[in-house]
Image (cartoon, coloured by chain):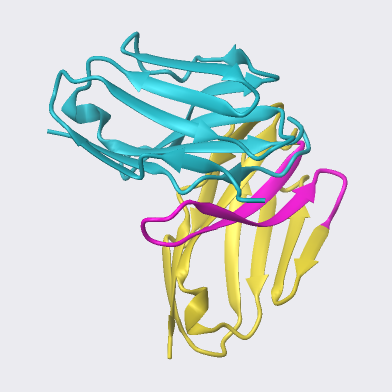
Amino acid sequence: KQEVTQIPAALSVPEGENLVLNCSFTDSAIYNLQWFRQDPGKGLTSLLLIQSSQREQTSGRLNASLDKSSGRSTLYIAASQPGDSATYLCAVGHDYKLSFGAGTTVTVRA
Amino acid sequence: DAGVIQSPRHEVTEMGQEVTLRCKPISGHNSLFWYRQTMMRGLELLIYFNNNVPIDDSGMPEDRFSAKMPNASFSTLKIQPSEPRDSAVYFCASSHTTNTGELFFGEGSRLTVL
């Protein structure tokens, strides 16, 4: 069974600092990895999708890397803003199933 | 596109009542998923449909839960009878393909069973 771990569970940084969110998974036989953002009381918003053949994806201030061999992915958010405050979830795809981490709750202080 | 649309957004009911949650996936998507999110267990996959056919319902907690997808643009998740432990946020999500498709979530239906 795929286990997905996200450390730390919570993170507080001052505005402007770069964010580094970690995700690790136990089974490297994955099809893709997806990073989501969830605001309180809202659904999950897809941020980045990395296919298993890719090493990274970038969108604006966001960059996600994938190292299948070590079972790790990292989400970088450059120059954080208060609007980046949310919970970020990592999900690992195998066949049709996504296995989710518990998320990292980020607070960006103005 | 309007995205994945779920209704109702909030539902408060009493134990023993029937609950029906509804989902309209993104047009053109052929895969639909129902998830449940709780603080204790995080996100759990309940059931997965591909081309309107249930492929995996192993995550459905028990016989009180049932799901249908009568056509490509509509799905329901029904709980009968409901119990307090069913209180959670239920999400519907859809994608264009199964293995490589990006998953899009609805806003969720928050269910409270008293």
Between A81 and A27, the one nearer to me in the picture: A81
Question: Which residue occupies 30% across, 38% down?
Answer: B88
Q: Main secondary structure of the magenta part?
A: strand
Instruction: Please state if A33 lies on the left or on the right of B73 as rendered.
Output: right
On the image, the x and y values in percent for residue B106 come to 51, 45
Judge left or right: residue A82 versus residue A56: left
- Residue A65 seen: yes
Q: Quadrant of residue B61?
A: top left
Residue span colored magenta? A31-55
Q: Relative to residue A69, is residue B77 drawn left or right?
A: left
Q: Colour of chain A?
A: yellow
Q: Position of residue A55 (x, y in %)?
A: 84, 56
A71 or B3, which lies in front?
B3
Q: Residue at coordinates 39% horizontally, 30% vertically from top-left?
A: B21
Colour in which chain B is drawn: cyan
* Quadrant of residue B101 within the rendered picture: top right
- Would you say residue A51 sits in the magenta stretch? yes
From where the camera sits, is residue A1 visible?
A: no
